[in-house]
Image (cartoon, helix red, strand yellow):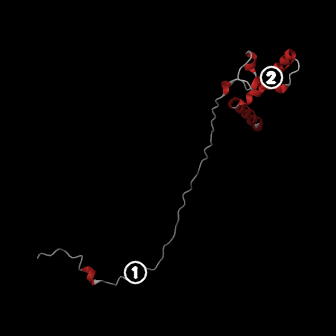
Amino acid sequence: MKRILAISLLVLYINSNTELHEVLRLPLLIEHFTEHKKLVGDISFWEFLVMHYNTSASHDADDNRLPFKDPAHSFSATTLAVPIHRIILNEIVLISEVSHISSYNETFIASHLSDIFQPPRIA
């Protein structure tokens, strides 16, 4: 059922947003070709296509009904819906004991530096 629904929605989307719907006018093309065949006699299908699609001038109102002749559907707006996935973040608590031995020697006293940090003296 999901597959049928997906295919039908895809066909609906392609038909409305692209020029593929012009394929539905192909029977009009065949019918118009048979009319020209009756009027002209020996005209090939290629000559018929060149006559109707290679020139910019249209001969009658039926020519504008042919597939890919109507410029009314030249703009196509498409949208894309991107699904937003839920991201779940778990809080990770790291428990670690820091055990290190300090190599700083606290017994070292620099006497020449201790003279800097004295209160001001009255002269």
Q: Secondary structure at mark 2?
A: helix
Quarter assignment of residue 75:
top right
Q: In the orientation shown, which residue stands out farthest toward the right?
A: 42
Estimate the x, y position of residue 42 in percent, counting from the top left: 88, 20
- For image coordinates 63% across by 39% down, the residue present is 81
Q: Which residue is mark 2?
A: 29
- For image coordinates 48% across by 73% down, the residue present is 98
Q: Taking 119 as reference, is 84 left or right?
A: right
Q: Secondary structure at mark 1?
A: loop
Quarter occupied by the N terminus? top right
* Tag 1: amino acid: Tyr
Quarter assignment of residue 80:
top right
Q: Which residue is mark 1?
A: 104
Quick one: label 2, few (<14), some, or many (20+) residues within 10 Å?
some
Residue 26 in view in this figure: no
Indicate which disc, 2 or 1, sits on the residue closer to the N terminus: 2
Estimate the x, y position of residue 63 in percent, counting from the top left: 75, 19
Q: Taking 84 as reference, is 47 left or right?
A: right
Above or below 109: residue 70 = above
* Tag 2: amino acid: Leu
